[in-house]
Image (cartoon, coloured by chain):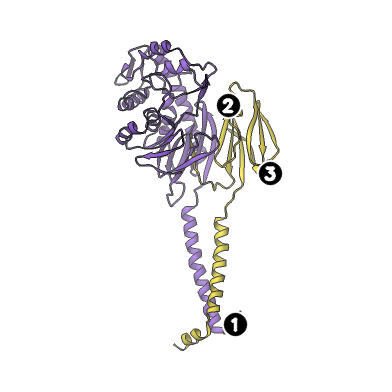
Chain colours: A yellow, B purple
Amino acid sequence: MKVEREIKQSVTKGDILLIISLVALSVFLFALSFFGSNKELTVRVYSSSELVWESELSKAQGEKLFLDGCEIIIEKDGVYFSNSDCPDQLCVKRGKLRNSGDTMACVPKKVAVVLTHSKDKSKIDALTY
Amino acid sequence: MVLMNKKSRIFAVTAAVLCLSVIACGLWFYKERTERFASSEKMTVAMGTIVTQKVYSEYAGKDIEKINGIINALDDKISWRNSSSDIAKLNSEKNLNDAAIASYILKCNEVSESCGGVFDITVGEISKLWGIGETTQKVPEKSEIEFLLKDVGYENTEIKGNDITLKTDCSVDLGAVGKGIACDMAKSYLEASDANGAVISVGGSILAWGSYNKAGDPWKVAVRHPHKENEYIGVITLNEGFVSTSGDYERFFEQDGKRYHHILDAKSGYPAESGLASVSVVCSSGILSDALSTACFILGEEKSRPVLEKYGAGAVFIYSDLKISTVGDVSFEG
C-alpha cells in the first residue's frame, strides 16, 4: 500500500505521456520492420517457359532486350514489346505493362513478360480477362 | 521532462516492457498466421495463351511441371486445330468413343439447354467462317451463316455412354471451355498433392485453390477493365473456386465502322449484342464458369439470373458504359 501510494504520488501525467510515447514509437518501428511495403516492381522475361531475364524495373530502365525475334523495351514506368517478327503483332499492340500482375506474351514466339512486386506484396493474386 | 524517483522508474520500465512484449507477441502471431507459405511461380505459353501458375508448396516446382504436362496433354486432346486431336477426329469422322470428351460435351449441352441454345459448342463451323482474330477475319454473307446454322445445335450431338455421334455436319469446338477444363484438371491434381494452395490462370480463366497462409485469407482476383488493357476495374474476393471472364475486347475487328467481337450467339450466328462489355462468373467448376461466362454474356443480365441460380454461381456484369452489376453470391469491389 505504501509503495502504491508513493507511485501514485511520484508518477505524473508527464511520465505517463512519456511512457505512452515511447511504447507507441517502439510499436511503430516494430510494425514497420514487419510490414514495411516493398513497392519495387520486378520484370521477368520468359522464353519457352524458362525464366531468361529478371531485374528490378528501376534498375533496368533504358534496357532493350532482343529475344527470339522480339524486342522488349524497359522504361521507368513500365515494359513493352516494341517489335516482333510474329504475324499477328498482338504483343506489340498490347501496349505498356505498368502494374504488378500485368502479363503479356508473344504467343507465336513463346516469349512472355510479367511485372510483379519484388517481394510478392501485391494485393492481387490473379487477373481474369 | 519530468524526473522520476527510483520506484516509479522501475514501474515505468516494467510497464513499458510488458506492453511491448504483449504487442510483440501479438504481431509475431499475426505475422505467422498471415505470412504466405513458400511458393514457386511459372509462366508458360500453352493452349494458345498465357498460363501462369503460383503454387504454395514445398514441392511447388514439381507440382508446376506436372500441371504444365496436364494442360499440354489436354490441349493435344481437345484442340480442333491439331489434326490428330480427339476433337478433330470427332469432327471429321462424326463419331468418337472417349469418356472425357463425352463428359465435357454433356456438361456443355446441359448449359446450352439452360440458356435456350445461345451458347452451343457445335457453332464451330460458323466461328471458322467469321475467323475473328485470324488473318481471314471478315463479315460473312448472311446466306453463308444461314447455310451453316441449320446444322448447329447441341441436340445434334448424340451421346450413349462414352460414344459420341454428330448427327449433322456440325463441328464441335471446345475452345470456349478448354481453359476451364484445364483449371478443373489442375484442381484434381492439387487435391491429391501436398500443396497448401495455388492460383492458376489459363488465359484468364482462374483456379483459386486452398490457402496461401495459415489464416486462410481469401484470394483476390482482379477483373480486367474492358476499355483499358493494362488496368483492372475491380477485384473479386473468394475463398476457393473458379473465375472466368468473357469480354468483347479479347478478339474483334472493325468493318465499315462496326465492331465485331468473337462471342457468337449460336441462335443467330452473329456476335452477341447484349450491351455488355464483359461478364465474370464465379463458381465451383472450371468448365461451368467458362461456359456460363459465355452464356451470360450472350443472354444479358436479366435472362442470366435463373441460369446462374441453377448452378449456384455468381457473376459481375460490366456494361459497355461501364455500369457494374453483380448477381448471386459474388464478392466484388470496384
Rounded to the nearest angstrom, the CA distance separating label 3 from label 1 is 51 Å
The residue under label 1 is which amino acid type?
Leu
Question: Local crowd at mark 3 within 10 Å, few (<14), some, or many (≥20)?
Answer: few
At horizontal 47% and vertical 59% (from top left) the residue drawn is: B29
Above or below A96: residue A56: below
Q: Secondary structure at mark 2?
A: helix
Do marks 2 and 1 share a chain?
Answer: no
Q: Residue at x 66, y 25 (%)?
A: A69
Q: Find residue A90 and name its label.
A: 2
Q: Secondary structure at mark 3?
A: helix
Residue type pointed to by label 3 = Lys
Tag 3 residue: A59
Q: Which mark is residue B3?
A: 1
Quote the CA–CA distance across marks 2 and 1: 72 Å
- Of B248 and A124, nearer the camera is B248
Q: Chain of mark 2?
A: A
The residue carrying pointer 1 sits among few (fewer than 14), some (14 to 19) or many (20 or more) residues within 10 Å by Cα, namely: few
Sequence-first tag of 3 and 2: 3
Amino acid type indicated by mark 2: Leu
Which residue is painted at 50% across and 70% down in the image?
A: B19
Query: Residue B91 versus residue A82: which sits nearer the camera?
Result: A82
Residue B185 visible within the image: yes
- Residue A5 location, x and y as percent? 47, 87
